[in-house]
């Protein structure tokens, strides 16, 4: 067996590794370094601005990151940098940047990635803190003919595809996309979550479901006729984060969007609801007809393998392992062939999704006061 690393002419720069077992950037690295994964891309460089800074070197998680760095350098020849600008220029082939950093840092990191000759960028959700910043990033990439792919993994998930197909084949049905995380239902745990994801639930956790609404249900700021929160299900809280500063956000939220053309889709997100996602199809009266889940039963073997190879990681990493593998594989193949990445959201979808998130948030907060 020839390792993927030696087969591919697509070089990857991972920007924002974060803490092992806890950060999505680190999990991207583990998938790229797993030679059983036929992603057709090789990880050459990792940029970690925080843990390689003076302040970050003694912060929580720094020891685990240092251990990961030593192993990656020794076993895989990965080169580590604290700044994107220090990454060497492209020598041959094409370069893909995967940006998995804090949302507030993304615009600057994105500009730096354009500056080191990236041919394409895989940008984690939601892309930027605001619509204006994401639009600027979109325009900068277009000027340089750099293609931008988004990490909306649920656009390629089996459960969402099956739910959409069933509803499409059965007139008069309604779809609700449920998204559960497994934070402890306590002020301390949720306060930490609110502060770390200060952009808010609709721009973070539920952005995946909003991307589904934008991609497949004709939802945009201009097409929304109404949005209605489910008061019984939803919960909005104001909690102090680790810094002592207070943050107001949703710990649970369910709402229905109706478009001017009559399309309807419901979204529910619960930060303390578990580690699965569900596509639920009901009839007009609300009776359940069918439900599809993530993880999909067909993916159980891949998920079990991930749990064995890298024990102790955030549970949702294992659940999303097949989808994130599929995303990177499709992006790598699209770059190599010049074709399209089937189902993968573009930055155009991300801009509209973020517009919808900004548009809906104050309305839903007002309804839940």
Image (spheres, helix red, strand yellow):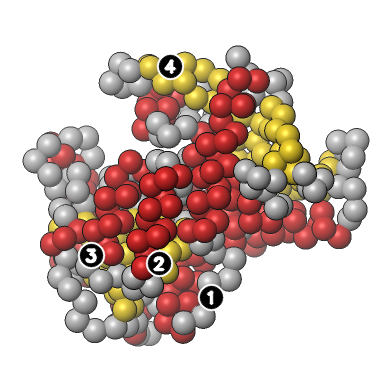
Residue 193 image position (x, y, % from top left): 41, 29
Q: Residues within 10 Å of mark 1 (few under 14, many from 20)?
A: few
Q: What distance separates the C-alpha of mark 2 from that of mark 1?
A: 16 Å
Q: Secondary structure at mark 2?
A: helix
Q: Residue at x 19, y 81 (%)?
A: 91
Cβ atoms at labels 4 and 1 below 8 Å apart: no
| Marked residue nearer the N-terminal end (2 or 3) | 3
Left or right: residue 335 compared with residue 211? left
In the displayed structure, would residue 6 be above or below residue 269? Answer: below
Q: What distance separates the C-alpha of mark 4 from that of mark 1?
A: 43 Å
Image quadrant of residue 343?
bottom right
Q: What distance separates the C-alpha of mark 1 from that of mark 3?
A: 24 Å
| Marked residue nearer the N-terminal end (1 or 3) | 3
Residue placed most toward the observer, 321 or 250 = 250
| Marked residue nearer the N-terminal end (4 or 3) | 3
| Marked residue nearer the N-terminal end (4 or 1) | 4
Cβ atoms at labels 1 and 3 below 8 Å apart: no
Cβ atoms at labels 2 and 1 below 8 Å apart: no
Dot 3 corresponds to which residue? 115
Residue 15 got which mark?
A: none
Dot 1 corresponds to which residue? 340
Left or right: residue 78 compared with residue 355? left
Image quadrant of residue 308?
bottom left
Dot 4 corresponds to which residue? 239
Residue 142 got which mark?
A: 2
Q: Residue at x 38, y 17 (%)?
A: 246
Q: Residue at x 53, y 72 (%)?
A: 341
| Marked residue nearer the N-terminal end (2 or 1) | 2
| Tag in front: 4 or 3 | 3
């Amino acid at each position: 067996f020839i390792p993927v690393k030696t087969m591919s002419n697509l070089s990857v720069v991972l920007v924002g590794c974060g803490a092992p077992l806890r950060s999505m950037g680190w999990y991207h690295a583990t998938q790229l370094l797993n030679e059983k994964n036929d992603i057709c891309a090789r990880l050459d460089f990792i940029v970690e601005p925080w843990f390689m800074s003076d302040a970050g070197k003694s912060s929580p998680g720094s020891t685990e990151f240092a251990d990961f760095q030593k192993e990656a350098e020794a076993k895989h020849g990965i080169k580590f940098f604290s700044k994107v600008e220090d990454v060497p220029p492209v020598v041959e082939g094409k370069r893909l940047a995967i940006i998995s950093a804090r949302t507030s840092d993304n615009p600057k990191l994105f500009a730096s990635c354009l500056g080191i000759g990236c041919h394409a960028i895989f940008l984690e959700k939601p892309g930027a803190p605001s619509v204006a910043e994401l639009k600027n990033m979109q325009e900068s990439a277009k000027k340089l003919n750099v293609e931008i792919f988004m990490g909306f993994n649920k656009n390629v998930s089996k459960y969402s595809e099956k739910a959409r197909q069933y509803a499409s084949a059965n007139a008069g049905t309604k779809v609700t996309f449920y998204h559960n995380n497994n934070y402890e239902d306590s002020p301390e745990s949720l306060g930490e979550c609110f502060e770390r994801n200060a952009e808010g639930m609709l721009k973070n956790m539920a952005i995946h479901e909003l991307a589904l609404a934008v991609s497949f249900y004709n939802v945009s700021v201009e097409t929304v006729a109404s949005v209605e929160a489910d008061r019984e299900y939803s919960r909005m809280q104001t909690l102090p984060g680790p810094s002592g500063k207070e943050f107001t956000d949703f710990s649970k939220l369910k709402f229905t969007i109706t478009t001017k053309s009559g399309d309807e889709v419901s979204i529910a997100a619960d930060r303390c609801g578990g580690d699965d996602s569900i596509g639920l199809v009901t009839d007009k009266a609300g009776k359940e007809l069918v439900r599809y889940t993530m993880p999909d039963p067909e993916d159980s073997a891949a998920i079990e393998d991930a749990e064995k190879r890298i024990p102790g990681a955030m549970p949702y990493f294992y659940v999303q392992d097949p989808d994130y593998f599929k995303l990177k594989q499709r992006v790598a193949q699209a770059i190599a062939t010049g074709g399209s990445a089937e189902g993968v959201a573009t930055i155009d979808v991300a801009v509209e999704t973020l517009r919808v998130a900004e548009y809906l948030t104050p309305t839903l907060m007002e309804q839940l006061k």
